[in-house]
Structure formats: C-alpha cells, structure tokens
Amino acid sequence: MQAITWTTIDLPGYEIKGISGSKIVTDTCIYDIDSRTWGIIVFPGASVTSIEGIDGDIVVGSYGGLNPAGVFSTHGFIYDGTNWVTYDFPGASKKLDIRH
C-alpha cells in the first residue's frame, strides 16, 4: 500500500473551486502543487474575475465590469493560460459563468 501525505494549502478567505492534476483553483487564483506557486487570474480590462473550475490547463469562469452604457455586466470565459475565449448566451439578461 502506498503511503499518503497530506499537505495544508492555506489562502485565507478563498474557496477551492476545482482540482485537476497538480492544479487547484480558487475564486481568483491557481496553485500548482508541483511547483508550489500561486498565480492570480485576471481577465484583461475586467473589474471582476471569478474562476469556477479547471480541467487540465483549461480554466473556466466569469468576468465583469461596466459596459459603455454604465451598466455592470458579466460574461463567461475559457482560459488556457495564453488565450481567452469569451461566451455570452444570446438574449440572456444575466450572464454568470460557464463550466467546462
């Protein structure tokens, strides 16, 4: 039987949203267990970014900010570490997030 080792990873005030391989995501951060490094994920130009899950290197969630009319709106995203793909459901009055 293989021994199991537990390690506490603490980032006060954040909720774990997903685990995939060696990566753990919280509301706005990604932690790599292998390299023991934290990264913050921020959608370019958004005032709010919220991560909802991870699958491999693919992170999904939502981002938002004021639109040109001065109304706050949110949109879904998929992020692979380099490229952002955004999603809006046609006709939706409230856009939250997507799940991969």
Image: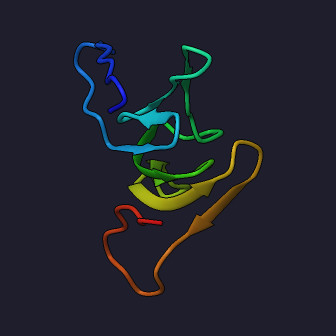
Residue sitting at the far bottom? 91
Residue 55 in the image, given as x and y percentages of width and height: 52, 55
Above or below for 19 versus 58: above
Residue 6 shown left or right of residue 31 in the figure: left
Residue sitting at the far front? 1
Above or below for 26 versus 98: above
Residue 1 shown left or right of residue 38 in the figure: left
> Looking at the image, what colour scheme do you see?
rainbow
Instruction: Please identify the quarter of the rendering in which residue 9 is found.
Output: top left
Residue 83 in the image, given as x and y percentages of width and height: 75, 51
Residue 97 in the image, given as x and y percentages of width and height: 39, 61
Above or below for 37 versus 72: above
Work out whether residue 19 or residue 29 is closer to the camera in this orientation and state it. 19
Work out whether residue 62 or residue 14 is closer to the camera in this orientation and state it. 14
> Which quadrant: the N terminus?
top left
Q: Residue at x 42, y 57 (%)?
A: 74
Instruction: Please identify the quarter of the rendering in which residue 85 is found.
Output: bottom right
Above or below for 92 versus 28: below
Residue 100 in the image, given as x and y percentages of width and height: 48, 66
Q: Residue at x 62, y 17 (%)?
A: 35
Q: Residue at x 61, y 64 (%)?
A: 86
Number of numbered discs on residues:
0
Work out whether residue 42 or residue 6 is closer to the camera in this orientation and state it. 6
